[in-house]
Amino acid sequence: MKAAPLILRGFLALPVGLGLGLTVAQGLGQLPKVLAWPGLLRACLLSLGPGMAAALISLGLVGLILGAQPRSLGLLERLLAPLLALPHAAAALGLAFVIAPSGWIVRALSPWATGWQVPPDVMTLNDPWGLALTLGLVLKEAPFLLLMGLAALTPALRQRQRVAATLGYGRVMGFALVVWPSLYASLRLPVLAVLVYGMTTVDMALILGPSLPYSLSAQISLWQSAASLTQQDLAAAAALVQAGLVVAALTLWRGIEVSGAALRQALTFAGIRAPWAERGLALLAKGASLALIVVPVLGLAGLALWSIAGLWRFPQALPSHLTLKAWAEAGPAVLQASATSVVLALGVTGACLTLTLWALQAEAATPRRSALVFLPLIVPQIVVLPGIATALLHLPVSLPPLLAVALGHAIYVLPYVVLGLSGPFASWNPHLGHIGASLGARPWRILWRLRLPMLAGPLAATAAVGFAVSIGQYLPTLLLGGGRIVTLTSEAVALSSGGNRRIVGAYGLAQAFWPGLAFALASALQRARTLPFGNRPS
Amino acid sequence: MNRREFGGLGLAAALWAGRGWAGDWARVVADAKGQEVFFHAWGGDPKINAFIAWVGDEALARFGVTLSHVKLAATSDAVARVQAEQAAGKTSGGAVDLVWINGENFAAMKRAGMLYGPFAQNLPNWALVDTVGKPATMTDFTEPTQGFESPWAMAQLVFEHDSAKLSAPPKSILALADWAKANPGRFTYPQPPDYLGLTFLKQVLYALLPDPAILQHPAANADPALAELWAFLDTLHPHLWRQAKAYPANEAALGQLLADDEVDISFAFNPGRASAEIAAGTLPDTVRTFVLSGGTIANASFVAIPFNASAAAGAQVVANLLLDPAVQARAQDASVLGFQTVLNMAALTPTELAVFTNAPRGPATLSPAELGPTLLEPHATWMTQISAEWSARYGLAP
């Protein structure tokens, strides 16, 4: 029984630790050179700023929307699947097409309203402050947090809001004071994952972020792949800085949590109800939920349209003719890559779920939250994976490429599975287990017949997230598979380096389809499930 | 067959004077049959991907070799893989069998002993390569190829414009600069260290230097010859797209700017790109190309085989197939790739020649005569110097 937590921790720590160790060894000597790089401060700020802002804004919007429950929440909930499923690079390209000076918004208004015959020379993309990047991150991460929040928002928690209402609190204020603290406990780890992702993203930063300088993570990947092969030590050293920056950001976040809690307490004790703010907050929630729907849907529709577009010049709002050429060209390759992607994702997610449940069950007596779970999320992939690939080459027997890739995916799927399951698992009412035990059920039977069925919702949501994370992996697929394993994402990223919107659109849609299916199944399961009794003591 | 055995065989055959390589080539072809060749090549262009898939069909039908295209976002991903294998002492069974490569990546691999060969001169179709008329097939960024890579396409810098909007484009670097100042925001270049961006800067350097011959020798650290380039860029940048506060990432992104009407003049390292895009329906058929008076930079694309390739025989068969006149003619077809051939037309049989002359060139592609004289790639150190100093000067927006 006690083996499982050890295996889990070992799997979280060993590969990344190994890769990181090799990076430290490689990069330590170059650290002075990186610290002397004049762009370092701005590159760090471009990692910290958009990452932090996107996490805060996403979390705030999710709280606001869940609290105010605008009517559009139902629609947003139904659209979560495709929004979450769209891979980051494709989402970024979609957004870029919407907001670019030659993009859809300007096309729709030109020339009749703007008088522009050619696109204006303004910087709505790649702006030096990382605003476009922040926007892209929020649009991609807020739906993820919303999914996690909806999964954790039990009827019992909702009831508290009604209790607060009887005490004269408005929807949002009541939610913030009595529901949010419990809900945040379940959201905390996902939001930290969002924070770290935002700080270390490469593909979104390259598409939406500035380039003079690039954000630190993007610069690391560029150094890593510099043709002269002389800057990999520099990349390793910069990765150490990145890891330190992430630790600093997590500490900063802890500070925000403490002050947020203090503020909430002060508001509660002062008995401030601020009914005048409710109207504005409700309006804001409505606007936010609509924006979260409209902008990504426009991006998605833009990609879809590009994938069937013939010639499409500025300022035409629609292509001058349609063609299925991109799909006809990509079709067979898409099907083949889909098969590999799905098999990998199913196997990896199944293995990670099993391992995590096993470990959580074994630890049920003494639940401990391990910081190790963040390790794979904190250390940039581009830094760890070359080290892991080298280590694999040193093995006496060479792993089959598919297995090596599965291993690489598992490193990055496992944290999300642990994050997704440990909160709901811990908040399950243990009294139910005691009742089961008093009726003579053994622990595994309690797990199988009581706990898992009651946790079916979070379980399904987590499985869908794990599946999507696996589908979206690029570097592990490329580096550990030696390029021999072709997935939808490895194809799509290679193609997006060419910037061809038609073919990227086709691949982006195909890439979104499978996780979309997984999320749709998960949310159908969540809706179909009827709870016989509340699953958390309130 | 591992590298040592093969090398031994090759040596024995070479010593066995008079018989040449025909017998050994038959042996290579026999070894290749049934092999799977993992061809690591940039996968960012669906046209190129489709062409490689077609070559794969040919390789399977004609030689029983299965060609698997590993689509890379950057060639250095493959180089890094071979480097890791070399560091791990993996001298056979490597993941990369064939890689599309040139310039800096080739020099790095050659320097580090990561390449198999020499093999290029032993390919039967090598005799057809125009090594005299196209010296870039033997010299990659002034680095002698010495048979460690085999050419498969010629590339030349050409400029693109929509003739419906701009009928008389500027045909020299200085005229281009004047035009850019008169038309602010309508021209830009990919951000170094992007390959095409650096090629543009080298082209500028050719125009500014009193004696461009120095470019064939290594550059000094912070070479004084570069001062003119920075002075030129200092005055040009305020008039570029986004006032040079942002740049397109690469050739594809620059091409997209032309398609989106964000710029009026773009450029590419493929004289047939515009025609191929017109054929694909992504550029209007009024787009045309032009070169600068005095010539533009040209180089060749190559394939190389890593020292530890699992299917070195199959890889050579594919390298040879890429030099096949029918394959070269297809690559040159504007509706396929529009790549310029590396072959010597005079070495072809009349039927082979007919395939070339009958292949449609496309509305935007210049004839070989119109493409005019070509300029040699400067020594690789110039690229390194320009790249490093550009980053130091312009890498941080003010």
Image: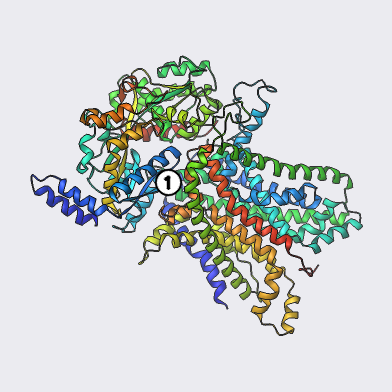
As drawn, which residue projects farthest toward the left? B17
- Residue name at image x 38 percent, y 19 percent: B292
Task: Name the one closer to the observer, B174 or A340.
Answer: A340
Q: Residue A406 in the image: x percent, y percent?
A: 48, 61
- Residue name at image x 24 percent, y 35 percent: B138
Residue corresponding to mark 1: B71
Task: Answer above or below: position of B358 versus A147.
Answer: above
Relative to residue B5, is residue B218 drawn left or right? right
Task: Name the one closer to the observer, A247 or A278.
Answer: A278
Instruction: Specify the quadrant of the image occupied by residue B383.
Output: top left
Which three-letter amino acid code belongs to the residue tagged 1? Answer: Lys
Q: Residue B95 in the image: x percent, y percent?
A: 36, 54
**In the rendered structure, the residue with mark 1 lies on which chain?**
B
Relative to residue A154, is residue A128 drawn left or right? left
Q: Residue A17 in the image: x percent, y percent?
A: 48, 62
Quarter holding the C terminus of chain B is top right
Instruction: Specify the quadrant of the image occupied by residue A231.
Output: top left
Quarter holding the N terminus of chain B is bottom left
Task: Name the one closer to the observer, A268 or B28.
Answer: B28
- Residue name at image x 49 percent, y 19 percent: B180
| Whether residue A215 is visible | no
Q: Residue B65 in the image: x percent, y percent?
A: 31, 51
